[in-house]
Image (cartoon, rainbow, N blue to C red):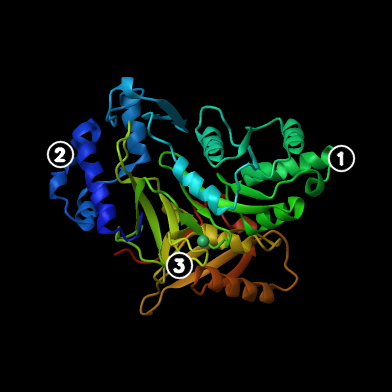
């Protein structure tokens, strides 16, 4: 899929829309209520402006009201081939021909330089949730010999990975770190006794520090990947590690300004809204999980022309400051480099009579910095380089910053004092 969408992308979308409107009682009702005839939607803009979004809460409420599957369903139960469950629980039945993200994962595995015949060690959970089994099938289809590691039993996992000479790791970065610790406890050297060459990192943030630490431990090159529980895997890094290529072929993805709902151009930050293409047992149309991504401009030097995205965070805490969308996660990626710093708050103001907005970072200190002025200057410089706007910096004791401002939710990290329009 391209962004912005091409006429061919939109044509595929229209075919799916007609099928969904005819077969899913939920979506038929939704479109009727919005007075939308799918035959009237002739352009992408018409689709975006007229078809309502579906939030996770809509799906949950619908399944609660009519357990177990609700009436999103587009086929009778006899046609289901498998059932995925995601936290909630949300039940996602699949047709036998729905491949549950396997083509996306295969593209991501290829971009990592994984070769047929390599031994891949999958450590996501195989229980109930789709993650482990989905990755297992994709590595099998890529021609790998796959170890169904799953979670836990870390000593046994180290023994098995060592005995089989696993060269590919797939799972969370934190579990890989744990395997390194376990190997050392067993008297092993993770670099010498384990063979991990490349790693598929998913389901958790892969910070630069963690990437470097795991490289130091194993000599492994990690590739970051992202997806979403209901719509499945989306994107993964290539060997240049400059953003994640959007590999999703069976999704129509929109990236929209969280405040205006308008399409975002390369270089901007947008909320993902996804429509599954092709027949599905439980179709999702304009599904909006609330995740924001930055779209990287230009083409990747690796030769893959697909759009590259960088996960920013949940849209709820994003604010547009001086015209730029800022997420507390971006600021945290800077402050977490300094051991003196803890929680923080960003105060946004637009003083009366002044042309420009002002942003102030109140950085909480957990111990007294040796050179406060220099720390403030360094912080301001690094913020400018990362979030692309100037922020004033003030150091305050961490107790002055509310606990709810802290990670991972950052609920009170942004304080907006601008006059409401
Ligand atoms: Zn690339």
The local crowd at label 3, few if under 14, some if 14 to 19, many if 20 or more residues have their Cα within 10 Å, is few
Q: Is residue 394 visible?
A: yes
Q: Tell me the CA gap for discs 1 and 3.
A: 46 Å
Quadrant including the N terminus: bottom left
Asked which secondary structure carries label 2, the reply is: helix
| Residue 331 coordinates in the image, percent (x, y) | 55, 62
Instruction: Say whether disc 1 or disc 3 marks the residue closer to the N-terminus.
Output: 1
Q: Which residue is outermost to the top?
A: 78
Q: Is residue 414 above or below residue 90?
A: below
| Residue 51 coordinates in the image, percent (x, y) | 22, 47
Instruction: Say whether disc 1 or disc 2 marks the residue closer to the N-terminus.
Output: 2
| Residue 62 coordinates in the image, percent (x, y) | 31, 30
Report the side of 367 relative to 303 (left or right): right
- Residue at position x 30%, y 40% in the image: 278
Asked whether the residues under the numbered discs 1 and 2 touch, taking CB atoms below 8 Å apart as contact, a structural biologist would say no
Q: Is residue 388 above or below residue 81?
A: below
Quadrant including the C terminus: bottom left
- Residue at position x 36%, y 66% in the image: 265
Asked whether the residues under the numbered discs 1 and 3 touch, taking CB atoms below 8 Å apart as contact, a structural biologist would say no
Label 3 belongs to which residue?
299
- Residue at position x 25%, y 53% in the image: 10
Report the side of 137 relative to 307 (left or right): right
Label 1 belongs to which residue?
187
Q: Is residue 47 above or below residue 300?
A: above
Label 2 belongs to which residue?
32
Mark closer to the observer (1, 3): 3
Instruction: Say whether disc 2 or disc 3 marks the residue closer to the N-terminus.
Output: 2
The local crowd at label 1, few if under 14, some if 14 to 19, many if 20 or more residues have their Cα within 10 Å, is few
């Amino acid at each position: 899929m391209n962004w912005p969408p091409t006429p061919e992308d939109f044509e595929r979308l229209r075919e799916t829309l007609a099928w969904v409107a005819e077969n899913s009682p939920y979506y038929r009702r939704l479109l009727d209520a919005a007075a939308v005839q799918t035959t009237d939607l002739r352009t992408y803009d018409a689709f975006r402006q007229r078809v309502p979004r579906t939030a996770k809460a809509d799906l949950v409420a619908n399944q609660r009201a009519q357990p177990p599957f609700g009436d999103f369903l587009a086929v009778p139960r006899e046609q289901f081939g498998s059932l995925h469950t995601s936290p909630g629980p949300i039940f996602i039945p699949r047709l036998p021909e729905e491949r549950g993200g396997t083509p996306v994962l295969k593209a991501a595995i290829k971009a990592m330089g994984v070769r047929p015949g390599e031994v891949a060690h999958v450590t996501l959970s195989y229980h109930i949730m789709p993650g482990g089994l989905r990755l297992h099938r994709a590595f099998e289809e890529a021609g790998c010999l796959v170890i169904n590691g799953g979670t836990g039993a870390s000593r046994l996992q180290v023994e098995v990975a060592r005995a089989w000479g696993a060269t590919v790791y797939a799972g969370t970065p934190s579990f890989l770190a744990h395997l390194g610790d376990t190997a050392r406890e067993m008297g092993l050297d993770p670099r010498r006794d384990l063979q991990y060459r490349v790693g598929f990192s998913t389901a958790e943030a892969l910070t630069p520090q963690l990437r470097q630490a795991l490289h130091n431990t194993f000599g492994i090159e990690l590739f970051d990947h992202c997806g979403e529980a209901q719509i499945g895997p989306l994107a993964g890094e290539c060997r240049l590690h400059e953003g994640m290529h959007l590999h999703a072929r069976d999704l129509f993805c929109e990236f929209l300004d969280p405040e205006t709902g308008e399409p975002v151009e390369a270089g901007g930050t947008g909320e993902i809204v996804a429509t599954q293409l092709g027949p599905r047992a439980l179709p999702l149309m304009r599904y909006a999980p609330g995740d924001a991504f930055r779209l990287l401009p230009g083409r990747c030097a690796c030769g893959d022309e697909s759009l590259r995205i960088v996960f920013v965070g949940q849209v709820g805490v994003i604010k547009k400051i001086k015209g730029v969308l800022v997420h507390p996660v971006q600021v945290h990626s800077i402050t977490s480099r300094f051991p003196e710093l803890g929680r923080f708050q960003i105060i946004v103001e637009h003083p009366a009579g002044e042309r420009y907005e002002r942003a102030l970072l109140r950085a909480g200190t957990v111990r007294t910095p040796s050179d406060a002025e220099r720390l403030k200057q360094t912080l301001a410089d690094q913020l400018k380089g990362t979030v692309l706007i100037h922020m004033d910096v003030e150091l305050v004791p961490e107790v002055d910053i509310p606990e709810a401002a802290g990670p991972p939710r950052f609920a009170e990290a942004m304080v907006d004092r601008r006059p409401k329009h």
